[in-house]
Amino acid sequence: MNQKIFKLITALLVLSFVLAACGSSGEEATSESRTIGFSVYDMQYGFFQDMEAGTREGAKDAGYDYILVDQKSSESTMVSATIDLINQGIDALIISPFKPDALGPIVDAAKEKGIPVVVNDIGGGGTDYNVIVISNNYEGGVMAAEHMDELISAAGKPKKVASITCEASAVYAARRNVGFEAKIKELGYEVVATLSGNSQQEQGYKVMQDILTANPDVSGVFSCNDPMAVGAAQAISDAGLSGASDIFVIGFNADEIALESIKAGDMAATVQQVPFEMGKMTVELATQLMNGKTLAYDNAELREIFVPVNLITLDNIPN
Amino acid sequence: MTVAEKQIKKFSVKLGWDLLWERYGIATVVLIAWVIAFFFVPNFRNPDNMLNVIRQSAFVGCAAVGMTIAIISGTFDLSVGSTLALSAYLGLMVVSTTESVLLAILVTVLVAMLIGLINGLLITKVGISAFITTLGMSFIVRGLSYIISKGGEPVRYNAKAFIWWGNGSFLRIPIPFIIFIICALAGWFILKKTPFGRYVFSIGTNEKAAKVAGVPVQRTIIFIFIIVGLFTGISAFLIGSRLYSAGPGLEPGFELSVIAAVVLGGTRLAGGRGSILGTIAACLLYATMGNILNLLHADAFVQRVAVGMILLLALSIEGIRQRIFEHSSRRITTLEIEPNSNEYQGGQA
């Protein structure tokens, strides 16, 4: 008796979870319409949620079917999920890779099926992708330098600034500091320190303390990302000064903490990337590639296309 | 027939069903899942897709063979994830500088076996529990891989001779899957055909009794951890090759996937019972479910929930099974039922 109950329960359980897995079967793509596949870095992050929304909207506007997979911040999942995507017969692949170094098998598999690959941000991993879309980091640094110059000139402070960088391996992010330093020097400033905070808030704090000790008369700081900028602003306020009126702190990314910090008057500005527009742009590029057009690269050697960025200050801060 | 004999007879029937589930349950589930997916999940039947599923099963699979042996002996290893990352990273470093694939295989596997040896020595000679030892080791090894890589960027290498191991095929069958099956056969042979395998079962069933019966418990445990290292090293090499790269942050949570696959395959965490076939089936099920969820375009957050639920469900089947098994039978000593079970080859070799 118990045997039968056991068998029944087993059978039901097995059936239920198999059926559950098959429950919401998606409709098969028609052969006429094109399908765009997007492999996203990790949907846990706001930046990639915006990027995904832009990609989805772009695909919808163009009348494409759209399939999304999430790499969940794992290079293994990045490869397995994206290969699953390619095997569903997509016509173009858009990917924001968690680890560009593991792009190799993905790009090879796509090329084997003749599918164009559009990389959105992060990096191309030295692979044979068709195009990579990245924020115009250099220009963002230049914008920060120009704004800082306005602030410092208006306040009549010494022309001495510092630059906090991300880890050396973040090659695209490094262009922000390069752009900033080039422009600020051009405007007649001295860069008294260029130090790495490894992208981390605590390290931004420490680095700023060191800068303040060595150069008490520094009047502006540019940080490669917002967490480090917020950390630096904290160090400045702990020294009894303000990061928005005594030493001007400008970050990069427009992260929530930075926006809060600007509103609270602890930080001067940040540079905003536009992931939604980047997403839309990748679909347009995919369309051109599927139609066999050649692309107008900003940097032809590395097949890069740059997306403009915005400066966010107290005057234009989003609510 | 005496009353006792009748009881044993009745018991053995129940035991038969119980063992049948234990051995073939998950394999049956996989087959059912495949049949249903074949007809109802769009694109599943695409040969490229099905081959990708079995390829995918191998990366956790090879390490799971070693872990099956560890869990049958009543222990487990939480350091396999970190070991995977360090050994894969060192393997990539070797192959990208020397361009010798053979040397890369050797380094990857030997590093992983060395970590296994240290685990085994700490557990047996110093007497720290396996949980603490391997947990501590996982932090140390992960930290080491970040130190060696000076901060964490992956090493990349894409010569054909290297990436073939993770991405190639023989007669369309993915190479990693072939290696997985070879590993599984080796694991089966070790467990079933060697004195060492009998020691593993007897330690898992009752370590004290095994010791009394003359099983070299300490030596066996050290060997178990070396074997776990060996199979983890094979997984590490295959993943490095599959990704054309390896970084120190490779596969966070890998150890849990491996342990989950082994337990899902019917191997008891308490030790003493388990099978390689179950582990193979569970790895296939894991890969299949991940694939099906992707093909059905399941939301990423839903996927996380689904994977957890499948695991809980599988484990509760195990729990329900044991409850029915225990309630429906009078307690009969383990000794008397031994002839009915190939899995119970406890005692001395």
Image (spheres, coloured by chain):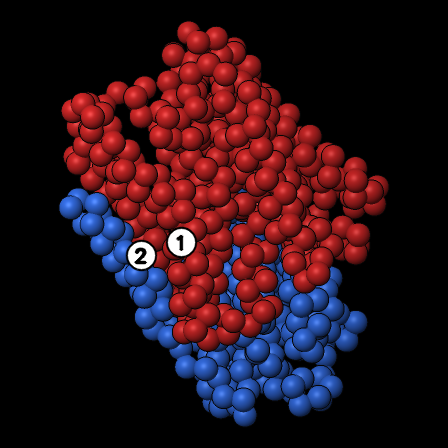
Chain colours: A blue, B red
Q: Residue at x 60, y 46 (%)?
A: B181
Report the disc number at residue A224. Answer: none
| Image marks 2 and 1: residues in contact by CB distance under 8 Å | yes
Which amino acid type corresponds to the residue marked 1 in the rendered image? Thr
Picture residue at 47% right of the left edge, 59% below the top: B288
**In the figure, is residue A312 to the left or right of B308?**
right
Q: Position of residue B310 (x, y in %)?
A: 34, 53
Residue A3 located left or right of residue A218: left
Amino acid, disc 2? Val
The residue most toward the bottom is A32
Q: Which residue is mark 1?
A: B28
Of A138 and B129, the residue lying toward us? B129
The one nearer the camera, A186 or B223, is B223
Residue under circle 2? A14
Mark 1: which secondary structure?
A: helix
Can marks 2 and 1 be said to lie on one chain?
no
Whether B174 is drawn above or below B107: the answer is below
User: x, y percentage for residue B56?
Assistant: 56, 55
Name the chain letter of the residue that bears numbered label 2.
Answer: A
Q: Secondary structure at mark 2?
A: helix
Residue A250 % position (x, y): 52, 59
Mark 2 vs mark 1: in front: 1
Measured in 3D between alpha carbons, the distance from the residue under mark 2 to the one under mark 1, in whole angstroms, is 9 Å
Mark 1 belongs to chain: B
Give the residue at x 73% y 86%: A294
Please provide percent x and percent y for residue B206.
37, 18
The front one of A146 and A99 is: A99
**Residue at screen point 57% across, 48% down:** B59
